[in-house]
């Protein structure tokens, strides 16, 4: 009887941890952005120190001009935002919590080409100020898998592991995850190779997007540079 009770206890514990691991696998990363004034020098070390204090796992720290972004599984976001605001007084703090678009390779391409390690490429742009056009943009992405399947097929062809698009106000945050050690310059052309529908999609999307404050004339999407892995 004791062995039976012990077996049941172990089985219950195993099921508990299985449930935890399943939930963790379904979790999506988030992004937190610190925006200083245009032309202002902004120190990434303060944000790195905060993340280490908060024990944020598997996070990457990125920078573009006066913008800093930490990307990963952000725990205790309210406390994180509080500490970041205290360290970066006078800066704007933005949280990108839930993506409105989520391409995941395992769901859209099958198990072939799944990479154990990823490199994350982060870009940002603005939606145009027209609310009607903003909604059209969101609607396109909401139905993309059904009406434009060639786009996700292009992502499969390019070995993209995940592609998330977040929105905060007018600002978009795009994260493209590729196999570790690969180059986006090498992989991205594969999305359109023998796939003209992707070019058509990109041309349509371009009319809804514009550069954020501080970009050059005619510049839309800007790339964040990896500062450090936390």
Image (tube, rainbow, N blue to C red):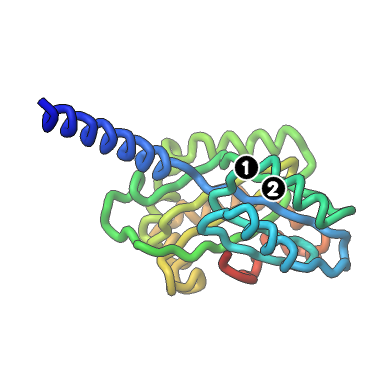
Q: Which element type, helix, strand or loop, lies under badge 2?
A: helix
Residue 207 appears in the rendering: no
Task: State left or right for residue 42 relative to residue 59.
Answer: right
- Which corner quadrant of the image does residue 4 belong to? top left
Q: Residue at x 58, y 39 (%)?
A: 98
Q: Residue at x 51, y 72 (%)?
A: 185
Residue 49 appears in the rendering: yes
Q: Residue at x 40, y 38 (%)?
A: 23
Rendering coords of residue 31 (x, y %):
63, 51
The quadrant the N terminus occupies is top left
Task: State left or right for residue 116 relative to residue 223.
Answer: left
Foreground of the two, 50 or 93: 50
Foreground of the two, 158 or 49: 49
Rendering coords of residue 203 (x, y %):
59, 53
Query: Which labelled disc corresponds to residue 128?
Result: none
Q: Are marks 1 and 2 in contact (CB under 8 Å)?
A: yes
Foreground of the two, 206 or 49: 49
Q: CA distance from mark 1 to mark 2?
A: 6 Å
What residue did someone put label 1 on? 76
Q: Residue at x 46, y 51 (%)?
A: 197
Local crowd at mark 1 within 10 Å, few (<14), some, or many (≥20)? few
The quadrant the C terminus occupies is bottom right
Rendering coords of residue 40 (x, y %):
87, 66
What residue did someone put label 2 on? 80
């Amino acid at each position: 009887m004791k062995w039976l009770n012990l077996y049941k206890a172990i089985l219950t514990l195993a099921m508990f941890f299985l449930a935890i691991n399943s939930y963790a696998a379904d979790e999506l990363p988030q992004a937190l952005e610190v925006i200083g004034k245009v032309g202002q020098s902004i120190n990434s070390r303060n944000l790195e120190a905060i993340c280490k204090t908060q024990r944020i796992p598997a996070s990457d720290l990125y920078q573009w001009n006066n913008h800093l972004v930490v990307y990963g599984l952000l725990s205790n976001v309210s406390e994180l935002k509080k500490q970041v605001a205290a360290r970066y007084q006078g800066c704007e703090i933005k949280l990108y919590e839930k993506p409105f678009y989520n391409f995941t390779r395992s769901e859209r391409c099958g198990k072939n080409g799944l990479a154990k390690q990823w490199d994350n490429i982060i870009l940002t742009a603005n939606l145009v100020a027209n609310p009607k056009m903003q909604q059209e943009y969101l609607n396109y992405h909401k139905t993309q898998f059904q009406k434009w399947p060639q786009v996700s097929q292009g992502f499969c062809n390019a070995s993209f592991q995940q592609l998330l698009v977040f929105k905060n106000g007018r600002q978009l945050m795009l994260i493209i995850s590729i196999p570790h050690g690969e180059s986006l310059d090498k992989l991205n052309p594969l999305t359109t190779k023998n796939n003209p529908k992707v070019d058509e999609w990109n041309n349509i999307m371009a009319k809804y997007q514009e550069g954020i404050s501080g970009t050059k004339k005619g510049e839309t999407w800007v790339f964040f540079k990896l500062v450090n892995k936390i």
